[in-house]
């Protein structure tokens, strides 16, 4: 895939479907790609989420207002900004030999196209290494194949 926009998501989904693959679920790199993929899925007669589950990442406003609203991972942008500044300050004040460290800001899984219809968040803010919880949540795997197909 060449880029990160709607056209790129549409092309990737079209390529996948043209190869004869019909995924159970798709987790797009971002919401724009997911919106492009959604367009191709619906124009080819596939229903989201009934036929193919689709999840984006970054919770852009556009994903909330389509005919089919987009389920997404909503990153904790305030925590990302705060941790980025903290890392920069540490880097500027620490020894040049200080080891790197990993930060893991939280996120929300925002499920929008579920039954009964309507937006809701199934999870609260997650900390490092915690998993989403809830009876309605299933593991989404990129290009997961249908059994026997």
Image: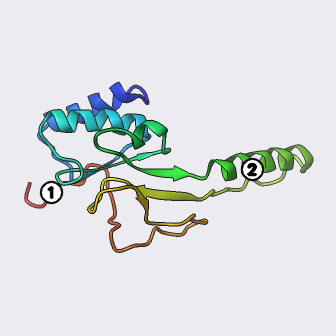
Residue closer to the observer: 26 or 21: 26
Q: Position of residue 146 (x, y in %)?
A: 15, 57
Q: Which residue is mark 1?
A: 146
Q: Position of residue 19 (x, y in %)?
A: 14, 36
Residue closer to the observer: 47 or 12: 47
If you read the primary sequence from the N terminus, does the residue marked by circle 1 or circle 2 appear first? Answer: 2
Q: Residue at x 63, y 56 (%)?
A: 105
Whether pointer 1 and pointer 2 mark residues with C-beta atoms closer than 8 Å, the reply is: no
Q: Residue at x 50, y 44 (%)?
A: 58
SS class, disc 2: helix
Q: Which residue is mark 2?
A: 82
Asked where in the image residue 11 lies, by quadrant, the reply is: top left
User: For the image shown, how many numbered marks are present on the structure?
Assistant: 2
SS class, disc 1: loop
- The answer to whether residue 26 is left or right of residue 124 is left
Q: Residues within 10 Å of mark 2 (few under 14, many from 20)?
A: few
Q: Is residue 32 above or below residue 107?
A: above
Q: Position of residue 116 (x, y in %)?
A: 27, 62
Q: Residue at x 33, y 69 (%)?
A: 136
Q: Look at the image and name its color scheme.
A: rainbow
Q: Position of residue 138 (x, y in %)?
A: 32, 66
Q: Which quadrant would the C terminus be assigned to in this image?
A: bottom left
Distance (Cα) linking label 1 and label 2: 42 Å
- Indicate which disc residue 15 carries: none
- The answer to whether residue 12 is left or right of residue 42 is right
Q: Residue at x 48, y 45 (%)?
A: 59
Residue closer to the observer: 114 or 46: 114
């Amino acid at each position: 895939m060449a880029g990160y926009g709607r056209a790129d998501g549409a092309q990737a989904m079209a390529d996948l479907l043209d190869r004869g693959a019909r995924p159970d679920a798709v987790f797009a790199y971002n919401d724009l790609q997911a919106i492009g993929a959604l367009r191709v899925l619906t124009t080819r007669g596939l229903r989201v989420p009934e036929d193919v589950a689709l999840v984006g990442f970054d919770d852009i406003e556009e994903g909330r207002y389509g005919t089919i609203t987009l389920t997404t991972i909503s990153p904790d942008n305030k925590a990302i900004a705060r941790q980025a500044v903290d890392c920069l300050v540490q880097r500027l004040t620490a020894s040049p030999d200080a080891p790197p460290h990993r930060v893991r800001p939280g996120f929300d899984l925002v499920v929008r196209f579920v039954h009964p219809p309507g937006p809701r968040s199934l999870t609260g803010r997650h900390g490092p290494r915690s998993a989403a919880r809830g009876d309605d949540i299933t593991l989404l795997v990129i290009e997961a194949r249908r059994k026997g197909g």
